[in-house]
Image: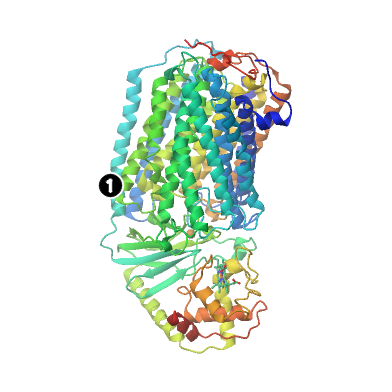
Amino acid sequence: MAHGPAKGLSRWLFTTNHKDIGSMYLWFSFAMFFMGGIFALVIRAELFQPGLQIVEPDFFNQMTTMHGLVMVFGAVMPAFVGLANWMVPMMIGAPDMALPRMNNWSFWILPFAFALLASTLFMEGGAPNFGWTFYAPLSTTYASDTVTFFIFGVHIMGASSIMGAINIIATILNMRAPGMTLMKMPLFVWTWLITAYLLIAVMPVLAGVVTMMLMDIHFGTSFFDAAGGGDPVLFQHVFWFFGHPEVYIMILPAFGIVSAIIPTFARKPLFGYESMVYATASIAFLSFIVWAHHMFTVGIPLTGELVFMYATMLIAVPTGVKVFNWVTTMWKGAMTFETPMLFSIAFVILFTIGGFSGLMLAIAPADFQYHDTYFVVAHFHYVLVPGAIFSITAGVYYWLPKWSGKMYNEVMGKTHFWLAFIGLNVTFFPMHFSGLAGMPRRIPDYNPLWADWNMISSMGAFLFGAAQLLFLYNVVRTILSGKKATDQVWEGAEGLEWTVASPAPYHTFSTPPQVK
Amino acid sequence: MLSTNTRSLTLLFATSLALSIPALGFADELQFNMTEGVTSVSKEVYGLHMLIFYICCAIGVIVFGAMFYSMFMHRKSRGVEAANFHHSTSLEIVWTAIPFLILILMAIPATTTLKKIYDADDADIDILVTGYQWKWRYEYLGEDVSFFSVLKTPSTQIHNEEDKGKHYLLEVDEPLYIPINKKVRFLVTSSDVIHSWWVPPLAVKRDAIPGYTNAAWTRVEEPGVFRGQCAELCGKDHGFMPIEVHAVSESEFTAWLGKRKEEAAAIREAAKQTLTLEQLLSEGEKVYTKNCAACHQADGKGMPPTFPAIAGSPIADGERPIAEHFNRVLNGGQGMPPFGEQLTPVQAAAVITFQRNAFGNNTGDVVQPIDILKYKQGQ
Ligand SMILES: [Cu+2]
């Protein structure tokens, strides 16, 4: 307990403290969230009306690509790692992460990865313009030279994620307080444990696929070049073998956060804890055998198409179990609706809507009409924005008082919620319609048939973006001048993290607590 | 607390609604659902789409209904005490089993339709569809008819200098013709990156992948014009490579095909003639505008470094041997598409002559169609 943090910059550069590193991850992710948001607003500004007004088609493609890459790898994933850093040790009664030096390293290589990626915006040839899915040969034979920066950027991000995942697994498996059996762990810890295994399984696959691209581009191989005997469809199989588990990497920790928040504000224990654990594990398992549902139109043989369709439909079962459990947790509780709860309820509703459109997309014959349209864009934004982003936001409001020792402003928090909620739905709901009406994704200009929906979407996007400024202001204000928070913070909160003081001391659980 | 919240919520909702209303008056028709399409397959697909949608709605009503009821009734402000239950095996079994059964019911019709979509055998007509950056090529197999199909919308409309037409970005210079009541098979492939050939009213979407030939089919029952677009990101002008299918009666189709064959013969004839510089230049400028300006720009300055300038290019201004110019245009390479197949000998000769005599490249060279044929034979 004797020593506190070092002073000045060296505290942040050399820190091995899970709380410091968690904060850095969260701030980094917040910055990336705004950067990715600006890219999105460029897209929405161009699409406000038919015709080309603001950007050229090639720059438009750079924006869609960078928006996707930055949001997925820069905003959502680091935010979850940040939350894990802060909360996993505190939830299992551990003094820190198992591998604190590696923890420092996992974080500090990230800014370099993104500096590399973002620097391409200022280079001749421009930023990656082949979509965040970077299908070959558009991203190899036909890409500009800057693609090499993108490849190295992805390598570094992957290394960071793998190290983070190893650290989380090592921490959870080795450092739980006495009495904290696996089946007593908070669900956030469980979902992160499973997510970490997913990361270790698929990040090397991503590294593999970009390395194959690198070889094709610079060393004359033809993994993905049909003219050299290679196979462009192979790229997609490898990419989606990473990509599908990746989408669960971005949602499983969200399940964990919401499963912490809903019981707190319903003042009632989580319903079906065990089935939640099993559902998470089955979703993780299924996530490895459904990848080709992203490729229904590439011409997979009928049997393959059917198998992937059935497997994909199956995911609805464990996902349904989760939703039913959350609703039943609320049932006969004594609910209050503070900001974290509002975001969590919106999560359940809107994520379920995204799940519904996912189920529709699973029906292969119908997917022939949905695929690569705005319907898909609507679908994955419904699972990612209210899914990942809302749960992270909920988590920040929920734990900020514990982290900072100060209470955020509730009125501002609720205003943020309603603005974001309305903005989100106004942005993404019309995309279902424009997509069903036939608008392909990733186009800078379109037939006036879809003009109304696009105009509404664009207005919603700017509202959503503005709402996030309020969030930033509220967080900064809390840290600088918020009212003192109690140690318990929330009346109904349970778990080890609430047994320590607010703000959480620099070192917690130096002597492990005894869990009953 | 509650009342201020409700008030601010109503206000926000009202303003966002008010903002959207003028926008809604924009188009004369507002489409928000999938098209039923014009084939038996597209109608089945639409049926599946609606079925799964209604199932989702029903589940949504139950789940959200329970949730909203609970949010209203079980709130602390109503003075309720929280219950303490947290487990029920029977409930868990029920809500695992019921969705499972629903899924099986859903999988049956989906499987039937999918089988139908995959059954591309016994076609009456085969059309090879090839994606290029950024246009489509259609070849009627066994008929000696093939042509490119390129966006027709003028760039003045795209750049908002002129009002946009009804079929803005969904219109082409040379539509694809198919006969009604015949099974037409599309063999879809690509010559460069991946594209996807999608015509929503036919419910046909197949990826065009280099090295692969994917089969899809349709049988249209009513004559009509059906439009679609490339659906897979394929580079800069991905949004500008539409598809236009004209389904016509069989007799009309035969007549059209006959005319096309005559044109092909005429092109072969034309390749034998000698043209004047003026003829070549005027034809060449047209070819350039249609095929080359997208990358090399109308002023010949290109978009370096991706697309080099033609003005002052060593390949086009006589500094390097003319064979390199032929090779670049006919065979492409390094981001430059091959035009050997796309341009007739007359067009190729014309555009090369044009490039060698425009944008300040004053070589005075005249390239004749016969030179192109000789070059191709020599390869
Ligand atoms: Cu294309």
> Which residue sits furthest left?
B122
Does A514 sit left or right of B4 as displayed? Answer: left
Indicate the quadrant containing the C terminus of chain B: top left, top right, bottom left or bottom right.
bottom left
Residue at 33% across, 59% down: B217
Does B62 sit left or right of A75 as displayed? Answer: left
Residue A48: image location, x then y, percent: 61, 49
Q: Amino acid at mark 1?
A: Thr
Residue A334: image location, x then y, percent: 51, 14
Does B116 sit left or right of A408 as displayed? Answer: left
Q: Nearer the viewer, residue A455 or B340?
A: B340
Q: Nearer the viewer, residue B302 or A183?
A: A183
Indicate the quadrant containing the N terminus of chain B: top left, top right, bottom left or bottom right.
top right
Residue at 39% across, 16% down: B87
| Residue A400 shows in this picture | yes
Is A60 situated above or below A19? below
- Can you identify the residue that label 1 sits on? B112
- Provide the secondary structure element on which disc 1 rests: helix
Is A39 situated above or below B105? below
